[in-house]
C-alpha cells in the first residue's frame, strides 16, 4: 500500500497524464509545490514499487497498477469534494479540508460517503432540509 505522500504523487501524476498526456518532474514539482529533487526521489521509489516506470531524462509512465490506484485516488478526492459541497461546507474550505482528511479514511468509509452522496443526489429535498438547519444555526 502506498503511503499518503506516495498517494499524493500518484494522484498528481495521474491527473497530469490525464490532462496533458504526460507528466514531467518539473510539472509534478510545480503541482505539489515541492523541489524537483524531491520529485525525483519519490519517482524513483514509485518506480521501485512498480507504480510507474521512470527513465532519467526520458520521463515516466504509470504502470497498470499505478493507473488503477491513480484513478481511485482521483475518485476519492472528487467524491469527498462533492460530499463536502453537498453538506454545505464553504467553497473556500473544501480543497484544504479534502487534503486534510482524504488519507485518513478507510476505503470502507469512502464507500459509505459515496452512498450518502448518492442518497443526497437522489433526494434533493434532504439537501434543502440540511441547508435549512444550517441557516437556523447561522442566525
Image (spheres, rainbow, N blue to C red):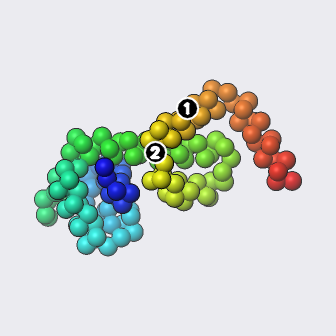
Give the class, few, some or many, for how many residues have Cα within 10 Å of label 1's Cα (few <14, many ≥20).
Answer: few
**59 is higher (above) or lower (below) than 84:** below
Image position of 125 (left or right of 9): right
Can residue 105 be seen here? The reply is yes
At x 32%, y 62%, the residue is 28
At x 54%, y 47%, the residue is 81
Image position of 8 (left or right of 36): right
Can residue 61 be seen here? The reply is no
CA distance for labels 1 and 2: 14 Å
Dot 2: element: loop
**76 is higher (above) or lower (below) than 43:** above
At x 55%, y 38%, the residue is 113
Which residue does the numbered mark 1 point to in the structure image? 115
Tell which circle, 1 or 2, labels the residue nearer the N-terminal end.
2
**132 is higher (above) or lower (below) than 54:** above
Image position of 76 (left or right of 47): right
Image position of 95 (left or right of 17): right
**32 is higher (above) or lower (below) than 87:** below
Classify residue 38 by image quadrant. bottom left
The x, y position of residue 88, in whole percent, is: 68, 47
Classify residue 44 by image quadrant. bottom left
Give the farthest residue toward the top.
Answer: 122
At x 39%, y 69%, the residue is 33
The x, y position of residue 7, in whole percent, is: 35, 54
Which residue does the numbered mark 2 point to in the structure image? 106
The x, y position of residue 131, in whole percent, is: 76, 42
Q: Nearer the viewer, residue 49 or 92?
A: 49
Give the class, few, some or many, for how many residues have Cα within 10 Å of label 2's Cα (few <14, many ≥20).
Answer: few
Q: Given contact means CB atoms under 8 Å apart, are the residues at marks 1 and 2 in contact? A: no
Amino acid at each position: 500500500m502506498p503511503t499518503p505522500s506516495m498517494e499524493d504523487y500518484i494522484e498528481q501524476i495521474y491527473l497530469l497524464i490525464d490532462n496533458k498526456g504526460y507528466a514531467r518532474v518539473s510539472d509534478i514539482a510545480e503541482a505539489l509545490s515541492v523541489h524537483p529533487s524531491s520529485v525525483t526521489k519519490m519517482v524513483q521509489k514509485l518506480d521501485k514499487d512498480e507504480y510507474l516506470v521512470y527513465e532519467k531524462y526520458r520521463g515516466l509512465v504509470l504502470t497498470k497498477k499505478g493507473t488503477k490506484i491513480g484513478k481511485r485516488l482521483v475518485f476519492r478526492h472528487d467524491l469527498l469534494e462533492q460530499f463536502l459541497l453537498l453538506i454545505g461546507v464553504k467553497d473556500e474550505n473544501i480543497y484544504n479540508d479534502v487534503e486534510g482528511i482524504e488519507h485518513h479514511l478507510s476505503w470502507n468509509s469512502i464507500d459509505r460517503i459515496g452512498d450518502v452522496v448518492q442518497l443526497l443526489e437522489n433526494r434533493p429535498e434532504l439537501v434543502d432540509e440540511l441547508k435549512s438547519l444550517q441557516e437556523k444555526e447561522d442566525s
